[in-house]
Image (cartoon, grey):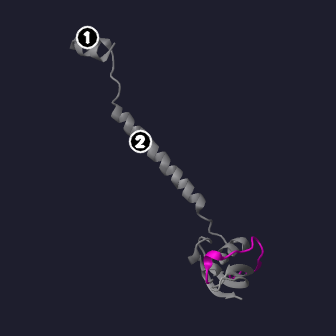
Amino acid sequence: MKYSDWKDLSAEDRKNINWHRRPHIKTATLYGIAFFITVIIIILGISKNSAVHINRKPTTKEAFETAKIIVREHLEQPSTASFPDNTFTPIVDSATDSYQIQSTVKSIDAGGKTIKSTWNIKMTYKGGDWSERNSWQINEVNIK
């Protein structure tokens, strides 16, 4: 039966047919949108949690990554800095969460010459996310 035929029926015939109208499109649409938004919120919540580093003591490699950022800030032209991949010497005092890291960096000085410098940094991990700058206390930075 077509909807146009339904309009032509009498009230008595409508009761006897037991034909029910479909739910409003608006209701189904609202439930669909609510479901979609809920799924997006859950996915974003999970992806945010995977980016947060666990509150633990950083490894020497993680401390080296943070130290490179700090040393780069102390160079004349930080954008030209080139660090060795995994060539560094760490000294870790796990009782005080102190890290002393030594390595080299190649950069361009103010005169345009490429120089290779040896750097040494002493820093203390204060807690929190190791990849954040404010989780570290910088005690000493030497670039020679």
Q: Mark 2 highlights which residue?
A: 33
Residue 80's x, y, as percent? Answer: 65, 76
Q: Is residue 27 left or right of residue 79?
A: left
**Label 1 sits on residue:** 13
Q: Are marks 1 and 2 in contact (CB under 8 Å)?
A: no
Asked if one can make out residue 93 in the rendered structure from this viewpoint, the answer is no
**Residue type for callout 2:** Ile
Q: Quadrant of residue 57?
A: bottom right
Q: Is residue 73 visible?
A: yes
Residue farthest along the left direction in this orientation: 10
Q: Name which residue type carries label 1.
A: Asp
The residue under the point 31% across, 12% down is: 17
Magenta segment:
76-96
The image quadrant that residue 100 belongs to is bottom right
Q: Residue at x 65, y 70 (%)?
A: 56
- In the image, residue 55 above or below residue 104: above
Left or right of 134, for residue 113: right
Q: Where does the C terminus fall, quadrant-wise?
A: bottom right
Q: Earlier in the sequence, mark 1 or mark 2?
A: 1
* Whole-percent x, y for residue 70 in the image: 62, 79
Mark identifier at residue 140: none
